Amino acid sequence: MAGKEIQEMKGSEGGARRRRRWAIAVHGGAGVDPKLPLEKQAQAEKILARCLQLGVAALRSNLAAVDVVELVVRELETDPFFNSGRGSALTRKGTVEMEASIMDGQRRRCGAVSGVTTVKNPISLARLVMDRSPHSYLAFHGAEQFAREQGVETVENAYFVTEDNAEMLRLAKEAGSILFDYRVPMAAGCRAEAAAGEMNSLPLSVYAAETVGCVAVDTQGRCAAATSTGGLMNKMEGRIGDSPLIGAGTYACKACAVSCTGEGEAIIRSTLARDVAALMEYKGLSLDGAVQYAIKERLDEGKAGLIAVSSDGDVACGFNCVGMFRAYATEDGLFHVGIWD
Ligand code: ASP
């Protein structure tokens, strides 16, 4: 048992339990444009700090980790700044197909959805799949039907489409590119510049950010993870990324919880989230050791990042691309919001 346990408490089963230290981390996507305007950086940091505070308050009031990650991701989905819920990336047809997953590490239960087009908060639908369906993963028509049966809030698909993202899609199409990091060469005429390593900045008005995720460990040492996204800008209809895939974009067990972001295809190839847990479980690595090993040894260069917490109340993050919107806090007093390395 770790030396970080700090006091005895009564467990829900009535037995004596050791109180653990809570920790929480949030991300708003990896692969940030290095020329992201300062006001957009400040806006991202403000939203992340607000959502982190929400999670911290929930952990302090003894909400279970799985409830905390759902709560925080709902908040991020509702804010159009990030690529999830309202503000989701668009398919090449200009529609929104969202996906999300959640995992409760203590009980090793999970729920996921893909191809969701009208559900206001896909993370809560994923939670319902976990809690109220006999399955782990529902997609497209079946997921929408389940949403109706459960009475979750739905809206028109147009609600999720923002002006910025419509413009971003136009630029992506012009450049013939599928985007995960928004560093798109703006037009065919700019390709030489891009090839020379000088990527174009997008016009100020069309900057957007990316996939969201939250991991938390509560005072009973229960770990949980949640991830939600619109996927990649200009993606094919029907494309499924890492975010709803348990073990790729999201994973939680008794040791840790992990949420990934970046190019989904690369994260899927790496089984990134599960690898972090496996490195802890099978190799006995620390949380940070496992995160850094997985990023360095398993992931293609420049592709992605992740946030993680351990049941001991540690927090870690890592990425091998230019930046990652992230924020984390621990009971020990750590409070950090950042974008760059
Ligand atoms: N991982 C997400 C996807 O590939 C994108 C992101 O993290 O921004 O769908």
Image (cartoon, rainbow, N blue to C red):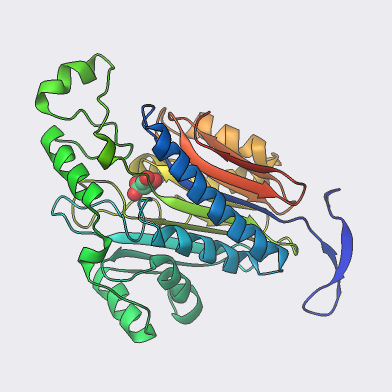
Residue 59 vs residue 50, the one in the foreground: 50
Q: Residue furthest top?
A: 196
Residue 141 located left or right of residue 61: left
Q: Position of residue 152 (x, y in %)?
A: 38, 79
In the figure, residue 67 lies in which quadrant?
bottom right
Residue 79 located left or right of residue 45: left
Q: Residue at x 31, y 76 (%)?
A: 154
Q: Position of residue 243 (x, y in %)?
A: 40, 53
Q: Position of residue 14 (x, y in %)?
A: 83, 80
Residue 96 vs residue 306, the one in the foreground: 96
Residue 78 vs residue 274, the one in the foreground: 78
Q: Residue at x 77, y 55 (%)?
A: 21
Count of all numbered marks drawn on residues in the image: 0
Q: Position of residue 56 (x, y in %)?
A: 65, 58
Q: Residue at x 20, y 17 (%)?
A: 193
Residue 21, placed above or below residue 196: below
Residue 30, placed above or below residue 127: above
Residue 113, placed above or below residue 247: below
Q: Residue furthest front?
A: 39
